């Protein structure tokens, strides 16, 4: 009887101690479950609930944004390149193609652009005294015999070309001499004519584009006094 009572008492005491250890105060010493310096781990369920932000009943007051004007970065100053200034001119005429080639070789390194060209030019070759063109060779010879009868022996019957069957009475460079011969033939009773003689001759030129700021002096390289220059359109 006594042993049974003692057993029940011990069991009751064990249950009380166990309940106190399970439901009682925590460890008063608060021993850390981790090593020093290592943060503790917490379950998500153990984190305190974050308070919900209060929603105002009315529209929130928005403070006006302040705009700060930023001065644009100063762009680097661009100095415009000074436009090149050019002068276009023509030299000539040169007497022969070789003269033109020599001038080109002397100037090609001093100019921006250069080109050579040839033109046909009508030049005055003198004054011509003659009789009207005859319709045939026989008619031209008949006029020649009449001139001899009048003691005019300086003549020539053209046998070919544009002036075929024409009796020529002289080609003169001096107009005064041409008029004197003309008057002599007319005074002898012949229908003389006086006309200018022209001829198509080639002329050779050099067209150049030069930098006018370089004080271009072509005369120092081409010393032919018959060659001149004048301004022309650029090419």
Image: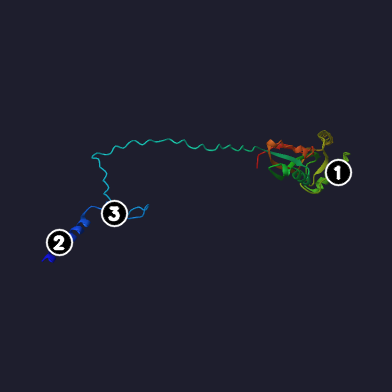
Q: Quadrant of residue 210?
A: top right
Mark earlier in primary sequence (2, 1): 2
In-front residue for pair 46/200: 46
Q: Position of residue 169 (x, y in %)?
A: 83, 40
Q: Is residue 120 visible?
A: no
Q: Residues within 10 Å of mark 2 (few under 14, many from 20)?
A: few
Q: Is residue 105 visible?
A: yes
Give the quadrant of the N terminus. bottom left
Callout in the foreground (1, 3): 3
Q: Which mark is residue 108?
A: none
In-front residue for pair 24/176: 24
Instruction: Tell me the distance, in whole angstroms, between the alpha carbons under discs 1 and 3.
Output: 147 Å
Q: Which residue is mark 1?
A: 145
Mark earlier in primary sequence (1, 3): 3
Instruction: Tell me the distance, in whole angstroms, between the alpha carbons under discs 2 and 1.
Output: 189 Å
Q: Which mark is residue 44?
A: 3
Q: Which residue is mark 2?
A: 9
Q: Residues within 10 Å of mark 1 (few under 14, many from 20)?
A: few
Q: Tell me what residue is drawn at x 86 percent, y 44 percent.
A: 145
Q: Tell me what residue is drawn at x 18 percent, y 58 percent.
A: 16
Instruction: Tell me the distance, in whole angstroms, between the alpha carbons under discs 3 and 2.
Output: 43 Å
SS category of the residue bearing label 2 = helix
Q: Position of residue 64 (x, y in %)?
A: 34, 35
Q: Quadrant of residue 102?
A: top right
Furthest residue in direction left, as rendered: 1
In-front residue for pair 197/47: 47
């Amino acid at each position: 009887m006594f042993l049974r009572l003692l057993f029940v008492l011990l069991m009751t005491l064990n249950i009380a101690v166990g309940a106190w250890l399970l439901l009682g105060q925590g460890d008063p010493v608060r021993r850390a479950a981790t090593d020093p310096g290592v943060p503790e781990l917490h379950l998500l369920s153990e984190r305190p609930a974050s308070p919900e932000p209060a929603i105002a009943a009315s529209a929130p007051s928005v403070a006006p944004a302040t705009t700060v004007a930023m001065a644009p970065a100063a762009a680097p100053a661009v100095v415009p390149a000074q436009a090149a200034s050019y002068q276009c001119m023509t030299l000539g005429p040169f007497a022969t193609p070789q003269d033109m080639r020599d001038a080109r070789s002397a100037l090609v390194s001093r100019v921006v652009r250069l080109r050579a060209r040839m033109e046909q030019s009508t030049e005055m070759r003198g004054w011509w005294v003659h009789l009207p063109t005859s319709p045939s060779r026989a008619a031209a010879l008949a006029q020649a015999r009449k001139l001899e009868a009048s003691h005019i022996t300086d003549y020539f019957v053209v046998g070919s070309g544009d002036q075929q069957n024409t009796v020529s009475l002289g080609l003169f460079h001096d107009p005064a001499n041409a008029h004197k011969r003309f008057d002599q033939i007319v005074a002898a009773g012949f229908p003389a004519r006086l006309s200018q003689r022209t001829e198509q001759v080639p002329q050779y030129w050099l067209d150049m584009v030069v930098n006018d700021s370089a004080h271009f002096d072509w005369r120092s390289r081409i010393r032919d006094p018959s060659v001149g220059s004048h301004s022309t359109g650029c090419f």
